[in-house]
């Protein structure tokens, strides 16, 4: 028994330290930090790989967490691209100088309001903040603006998500910029009184509660309505695209989009993936799996949802969603939304 | 931050045998404090005004929420854990062995899975929701879990097994001679319990509660699913909602101070009394339970089992069946399971090895320095997982960029996170080891290392196994640090559960949760076997 403790120490260090990298990636492999559900991304990526032979590894997580990781990793990052469900996160990344500006001709087919001014990110699909209304209740035809949700008559009849939901925050930012801070504050206060502290964790549950008549109206992303109708085609619910009157602000959109990491050595390959996602077929597929709106002009959305050309979208550039998020969070906290 | 350094230099001057041990212990603790240094560095960037803003706007509510949750969960865990441990350790009834298993199986279910299952079950078309509505009428509103009572329920069900394990181990110790002595002196059963058993149980309950409270303070899964604003959730929201690392670090620092205060107090009260077990004590057969007692015991244990394991298991099986029927269990799924297993085995082994010098140094030294080291080794447990992950990430990238990539970062973070579990259980075991045994070995001319190898380690073998199993289980379930630090494209079962559950893909989340349960069974079996070996050897 002539062990010396220093041997123990070196064994310990030897065990902890040099555990080799298990995942070695070939040069023709793309790595995407993806903040969007695998279910929606995988089919599109599979099609891309089929067409080009380029393999793609998805590293899935929450958008914000992946953005944090990308920021801290800096030049050491494995990521070639960053895919996010939220324009706010994409713009944050741009502001932190994490992304590579894409060739202007590449992203030209996407309208300027759905991409970064310096082309460091580009929006791929859009979702609308809409009302889901029970068609058999007294409120079936009475609601046409999100500001109606503050009506005290809706006490106990309104469903909203908790205030840490990303779509909820992004929507509130749009309202704040389109209708002003004071009006938005009043609106939040009215809703707070109407929900009596009872908010939902999932949009799905709001749609369900409206469908079975426990609630009359909910504020949700449009695709949740159609997911419910897939399962229960006869559910007594309908979509109301709000704020379409002559002086209304229009409906709030938020986009999912993609950016190329500044530190990738595979810019050409990465742009190929972006080009595919922007192409008419890529756009159709990317948006359709979740019944969202393609951001490329001329590519139509699923016929089930209201055509984008049939209504007006609030005139708020997506790039402001990130920059104004802190102000929105302040407002939400000031009101004390649950 | 100088305390470990002071301890380090202090030990260098101390006796020869302790030098290397103290050095090792200090090295481990220094590694464990890396995330804390990151937190301190970041919170130093906060201005006085920002501190004041944090203080007035957030702290009162956060403190109240966190502390009241910790107290309620502690009460819940003692109620469930000590009552079940008492019956199982002190009465012989049919199915006693099975009952032991049923009380520890809840450890295999992560808190976020508990929270997810119970919120799903309590929806209007969930099993419990439908039961509730048919019992109390369609118009009644369902119980709401999104408050402190819901979180207390979830965390108590998920955590009471820790108290059970330690209380059962203590109750199985041969203390009959003391009880008999008390009885001879005319004490009643209640008095014996109050004045003999309870004081003897106190170290075990305290150690169990320390584990539970630390779990509560660092829990991320349940509080984020149930949106209960504790420090962990608030810190996470600061980082992910506002990208405000400084405010997150400031809150983390306060959380660390809070937790360390708790640990110091707990240790202070525990260290005032120390009990050595007399190994030669007589062992008596357990008293057989009367039929009435047996039914009461099983009624109580059955209720606990139903809530803490039966319902979650039934839910997992039912959804896993749908996944199986839909051919969703494929090679990818087995890959996630393999990844989880590999990470948990390596991390648990490293943590047990790393914990030993800290625990042993403190057990033999019992000095301020060794105590300080022990406290600081707990730091990983009281920092929220995401904060540890970011701390390790920043440290490695800045200081040792060559080590970045692969599993290194994740393993370091996991060892740091769960080191306290290993330290706690080894320290508890070493505290019960009579120093005279070691002294006897040394007086017979055995060297310190041989004494360690041939006397100390065999005697605490059971506790080492327990420590390994506890770390293994927690690592297998670990979510927040793994989410951030896993190598690119490397998914574990918890990561998949979290991804699928947040997308409402229950048929994909359930089989992964079920795999966690199944994967934990063999190690639980090892641990239980060790326990029975320990008791037999008396």
Image: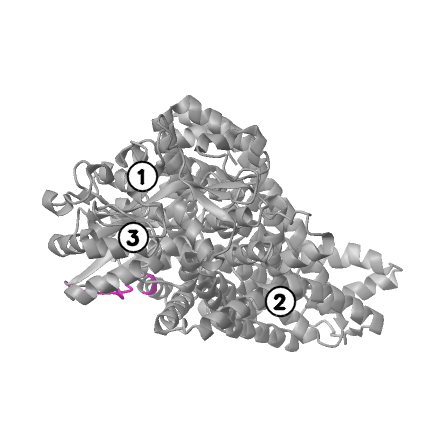
Decide which of B490, B145 is in the foreground and name it.
B145
Please tell me how crowded label 1 is: few (under 14), some (14-19), or many (20+) other residues with Cα within 10 Å.
Answer: many
Q: Specify the label residue A287 is tagged with.
A: 3
Question: Magenta segment: does it hold B198?
Answer: no
Distance (Cα) linking label 3 and label 2: 41 Å
According to the picture, the residue beneath numbered tag 2 turns out to be B310
| Mark 3: secondary structure | helix
Question: Magenta segment: does it hold A19?
Answer: yes
Name the quadrant containing residue B333: bottom left
| Mark 2: secondary structure | helix
Chain holding disc 2: B
Q: Nearer the viewer, mark 3 or mark 2?
A: 3
Contact? badges 2 and 1 (CB < 8 Å) = no
Chain holding disc 3: A
Q: Position of residue A177 (x, y in %)?
A: 34, 27
Q: Are marks 2 and 1 on the same chain?
A: no
Residue at 40% of width from left, 46% of height from top? A222
Q: Specify the label residue A88 is tagged with.
A: 1
Q: Are marks 3 and 2 on the same chain?
A: no
Contact? badges 1 and 3 (CB < 8 Å) = no
> Mark 1 or mark 3: which comes first in sequence?
1
Q: Is residue B296 left or right of residue A259?
A: right
């Amino acid at each position: 028994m002539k062990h010396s403790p220093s041997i123990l120490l070196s064994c310990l260090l030897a065990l902890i330290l040099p555990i080799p990298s298990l995942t070695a990636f070939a040069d023709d492999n793309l790595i995407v930090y993806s903040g969007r559900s695998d279910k929606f991304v995988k089919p599109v990526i599979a099609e891309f790989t089929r067409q080009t032979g380029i393999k793609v590894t998805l590293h899935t997580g929450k958008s914000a967490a992946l953005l944090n990781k990308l920021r801290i990793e800096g030049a050491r990052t494995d990521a070639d691209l960053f895919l996010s469900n939220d324009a706010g996160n994409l713009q944050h990344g741009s502001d932190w100088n994490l992304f590579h500006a894409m060739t202007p001709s590449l992203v030209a087919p996407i309208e300027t309001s759905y991409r970064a001014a310096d082309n460091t990110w580009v929006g791929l699909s859009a979702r609308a903040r809409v009302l889901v209304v029970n068609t058999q209740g007294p409120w079936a035809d009475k609601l046409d603006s999100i500001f109606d949700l503050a009506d005290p008559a809706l006490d106990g009849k309104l469903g909203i998500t908790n205030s840490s939901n990303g779509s909820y925050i992004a929507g509130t930012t749009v309202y704040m910029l389109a209708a002003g801070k004071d009006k938005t504050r009043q609106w939040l206060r009215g809703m707070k009184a109407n929900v009596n502290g009872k908010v939902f964790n999932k949009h799905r549950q709001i749609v369900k509660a409206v469908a079975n008549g426990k609630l009359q109206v909910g504020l949700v992303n449009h695709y949740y309505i159609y997911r419910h109708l897939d399962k229960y085609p006869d559910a007594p619910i309908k979509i109301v695209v709000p704020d379409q009157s002559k002086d209304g602000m229009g409906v709030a959109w938020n986009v999912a989009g993609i950016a190329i990491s500044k530190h990738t050595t595979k810019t050409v390959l990465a742009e190929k993936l972006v080009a595919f996602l922007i192409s008419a077929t890529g756009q159709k597929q990317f948006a359709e799996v979740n019944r969202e709106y393609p951001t490329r002009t001329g590519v139509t959305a699923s016929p089930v949802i209201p055509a984008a050309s049939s209504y007006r979208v609030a005139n708020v550039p997506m790039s402001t969603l990130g920059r104004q998020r802190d102000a929105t969070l302040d407002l939400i906290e000031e009101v004390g939304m649950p | 931050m100088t305390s470990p350094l002071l301890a380090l230099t202090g030990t260098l001057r101390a006796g020869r045998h302790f030098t290397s041990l103290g050095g090792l212990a200090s090295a481990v603790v220094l590694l464990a404090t890396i995330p804390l240094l990151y937190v301190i560095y970041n919170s130093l960037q906060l201005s006085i005004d920002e501190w004041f803003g944090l203080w007035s706007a957030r702290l009162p509510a956060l403190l109240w929420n966190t502390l009241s949750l910790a107290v309620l969960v502690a009460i819940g865990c003692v109620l469930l854990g000590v009552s079940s441990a008492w019956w199982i350790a002190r009465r012989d009834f049919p199915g006693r062995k099975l009952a032991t298993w049923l009380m520890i199986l809840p450890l295999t279910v992560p808190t976020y899975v508990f929270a997810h299952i119970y919120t799903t079950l309590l929806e209007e078309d969930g099993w419990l929701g439908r039961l509730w509505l048919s019992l109390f009428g369609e118009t009644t509103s369902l119980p709401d879990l999104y408050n402190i009572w819901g979180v207390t329920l979830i965390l108590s069900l998920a955590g009471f097994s820790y108290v059970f394990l330690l209380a059962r181990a203590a109750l199985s110790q041969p203390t009959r001679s003391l009880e008999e002595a008390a009885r001879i002196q005319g004490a009643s059963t209640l008095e014996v319990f109050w004045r003999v058993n309870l004081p003897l149980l106190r170290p075990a309950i305290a150690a169990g509660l320390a584990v539970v409270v630390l779990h509560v303070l660092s829990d991320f899964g349940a509080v984020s699913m149930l949106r209960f604003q504790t420090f962990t959730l608030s810190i996470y929201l600061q980082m992910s909602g506002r990208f405000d690392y400084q405010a997150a670090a400031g809150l983390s620092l306060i959380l660390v101070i809070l937790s360390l205060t708790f640990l110091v107090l707990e240790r202070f009260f525990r260290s005032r009394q120390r009990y050595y077990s007399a190994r030669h004590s007589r062992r008596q057969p357990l008293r057989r339970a009367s039929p009435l007692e047996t039914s009461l015991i099983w009624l109580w244990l059955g209720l606990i089992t139903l809530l803490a394991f039966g319902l979650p298991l039934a839910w997992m099986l039912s959804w896993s069946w749908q996944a199986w029927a839909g051919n969703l269990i494929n090679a990818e799924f087995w890959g996630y399971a393999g990844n989880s297993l590999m990470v948990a085995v390596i991390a648990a082994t490293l943590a047990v090895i790393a914990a030993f010098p800290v625990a042993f140094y403190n057990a033999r030294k019992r000095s301020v320095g060794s105590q300080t080291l022990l406290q600081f080794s707990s730091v990983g447990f009281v920092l929220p997982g995401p904060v540890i992950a970011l701390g390790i990430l920043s440290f490695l990238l800045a200081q040792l960029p060559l080590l970045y990539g692969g599993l290194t970062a994740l393993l370091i973070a996991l060892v740091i996170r769960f080191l306290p579990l290993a330290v706690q259980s080894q320290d508890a075991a070493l505290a019960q080891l009579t120093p005279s045994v070691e002294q006897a070995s040394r007086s017979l001319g055995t060297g310190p290392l041989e004494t360690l190898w041939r006397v100390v380690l065999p005697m605490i073998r059971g506790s080492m196994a327990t420590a390994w199993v506890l770390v293994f289980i927690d690592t297998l379930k670990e979510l927040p640090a793994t989410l951030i630090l896993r190598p690119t494209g490397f998914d574990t079962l918890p990561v998949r559960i979290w991804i699928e559950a947040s997308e409402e893909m229950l048929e994909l989340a359930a089989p992964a949760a079920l795999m966690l349960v199944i994967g934990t069974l063999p190690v639980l079996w090892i641990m239980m076997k060790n326990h029975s070996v320990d008791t037999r050897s008396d």
